[in-house]
Image: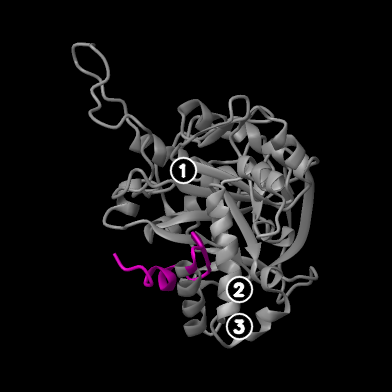
């Protein structure tokens, strides 16, 4: 599926392929993945997933796909287990720049030869110097600037497939006699979950670059979702929240002033969960209740030095009481909650912590191993 709606900061072309199938060769797909960024427009990555194929017989689960772009199939792996929340780290550069390194040949999974590189630019057995171009009209996805790839844009990995899935889930129903809308029952927009069309999906943008310019680069890419009515938004003029199938949240470097000054807010800010305690300033909490849909916090920051006791054990009664107080306060103000930065090993302790956090009221569980976490919530 290929999108034809892509807006731009500068003029660009789009591809017209429909999907990766038998007519789309593996060599052509590999060539796209090796795209070096040196062109007038970035190729659009085709994909062969459908919303029905991904989410049929899969029930939504309260999982947040942490660093989702690390996965073999970003977005698609998360949806296939029912994760309702997905995180992307995004980068925007106001000037085009190049990255040079020396490439070498190595053996990838399956025995296929692919280009690899050394971190210091030296050759492990010889190789040609390569140059990658990172454009000033793209928003890129990745954890570290060193390992960004020109083909891995926010549009390619997330926005294009999500828009296609939401469009498929919201077709037009028209009587053949032209008398109007033939859709029966609920007229609200459907989400991307086949078995639960009312379940919202949460897409996160972790800003890794300067917040204001990154926000300005992001906004044009969201316009098709706005035009189609796919986004949850807040109207500051009449203090009303309008629910849509997709909730967008910015975390990391927050463009607080830019978002707060908007009368219609289609993107929300990651709320500071640590603020939601018994001694909190109510005016400040009300402010964040209108800027956010989710309040997050790092577990070490929330528990302080007491967190060290949980590196080998479950949360004790006092710790659970403190966390539940924060969750309850956030819920009282209409926000969901998320904890990040907890243990990642051993697995039995990871599972124990996730189960405890869920029971205390955490709504989006931060997970790295999607399949293991999904087994905590069997269909």
Q: Residue at x 79, y 40 (%)?
A: 94
Q: Residue at x 36, y 43 (%)?
A: 198
User: Which residue is tagged 3?
Assistant: 310
Q: On the rendered image, what quadrant is the N terminus found in? A: top left
Mark 2 crowdedness (10 Å alpha carbons): few <14, some 14-19, many ≥20: some
Marks 3 and 2 close (CB-CB < 8 Å):
yes
Task: Please identify the residue farthest to the front as the structure is shown.
Answer: 279
Between 73 and 292, the residue placed more toward the observer is 292
Rounded to the nearest whole Å, what is the CA distance between mark 3 and mark 1?
A: 37 Å
Q: Position of residue 23 (x, y in %)?
A: 36, 46
Marker disc for residue 378: none
Q: On the picture, is 111 further left or further right than 338?
A: left
Q: Position of residue 371 (x, y in %)?
A: 41, 70
User: Which residue is tagged 1?
Assistant: 162
Nearer the viewer's eye, disc 3 or disc 1? 3
Q: Residue at x 36, y 32 (%)?
A: 188
Q: Which image quarter: residue 115?
A: bottom right
Q: On the rendered image, what quadrant is the C terminus found in? A: bottom left
Q: On the picture, is 254 further left or further right than 320?
A: right
Q: On the picture, is 199 further left or further right than 220?
A: left
Between 211 and 70, the residue placed more toward the observer is 211
In this rendering, the answer to whether 69 lies above or below 158 is below
Q: Position of residue 159 (x, y in %)?
A: 53, 42
Mark 3 crowdedness (10 Å alpha carbons): few <14, some 14-19, many ≥20: some
In this rendering, the answer to whether 105 lies above or below 51 is below
User: Which residue is tagged 2?
Assistant: 342
- Which span of residues is magenta-colored? 360-379
Mark closest to the chain's N terminus, 3 or 1: 1
Q: Secondary structure at mark 3?
A: helix
């Amino acid at each position: 599926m290929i999108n034809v709606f892509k807006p731009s900061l500068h003029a660009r072309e789009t591809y017209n392929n429909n999907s990766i199938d038998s007519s789309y060769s593996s060599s052509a797909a590999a060539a796209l993945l090796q795209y070096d960024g040196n062109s007038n427009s970035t190729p659009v990555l085709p994909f062969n997933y459908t919303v029905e194929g991904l989410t049929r017989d899969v029930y939504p689960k309260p999982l947040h796909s942490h660093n989702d772009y690390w996965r073999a199939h970003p977005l698609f792996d998360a949806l296939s287990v029912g994760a309702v929340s997905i995180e992307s780290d995004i980068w925007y550069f106001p000037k085009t720049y190049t990255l040079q390194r020396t490439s070498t040949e190595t053996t990838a999974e399956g025995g296929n030869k692919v280009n690899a590189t050394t971190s210091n630019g030296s050759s492990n057995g010889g190789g040609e110097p390569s140059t990658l171009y990172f454009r000033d009209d793209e928003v890129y996805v990745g954890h570290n600037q060193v390992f960004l790839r020109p083909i891995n844009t926010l549009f390619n990995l997330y926005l294009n497939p999500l828009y296609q899935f939401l469009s498929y889930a919201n077709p037009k129903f028209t009587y053949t006699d032209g008398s109007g809308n033939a859709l029966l029952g609920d007229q609200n927009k459907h989400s991307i979950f086949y078995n639960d069309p009312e379940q919202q999906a949460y897409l996160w943008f972790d800003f890794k670059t300067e917040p204001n310019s990154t926000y300005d680069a992001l906004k044009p890419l969201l316009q098709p979702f706005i035009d189609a009515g796919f986004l949850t938004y807040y109207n500051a003029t009449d203090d009303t929240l309008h629910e849509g199938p997709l909730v967008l949240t910015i975390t990391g470097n927050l463009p607080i002033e830019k978002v707060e000054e908007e009368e219609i807010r289609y993107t929300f800010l990651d709320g500071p969960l640590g603020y939601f305690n018994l001694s909190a300033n109510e005016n400040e909490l009300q402010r964040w209740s209108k800027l956010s849909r989710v309040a997050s916090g790092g577990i070490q920051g929330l528990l302080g030095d007491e967190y060290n006791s949980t590196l080998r054990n479950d949360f004790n009664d006092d710790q659970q009481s403190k966390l539940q107080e924060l969750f309850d306060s956030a819920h009282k103000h209409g926000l969901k909650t998320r904890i990040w930065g907890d243990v990642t090993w051993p697995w039995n302790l990871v599972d124990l912590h996730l189960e405890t956090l869920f029971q205390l009221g955490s709504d989006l569980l931060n997970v790295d191993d999607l399949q293991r976490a999904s087994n905590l919530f069997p269909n």
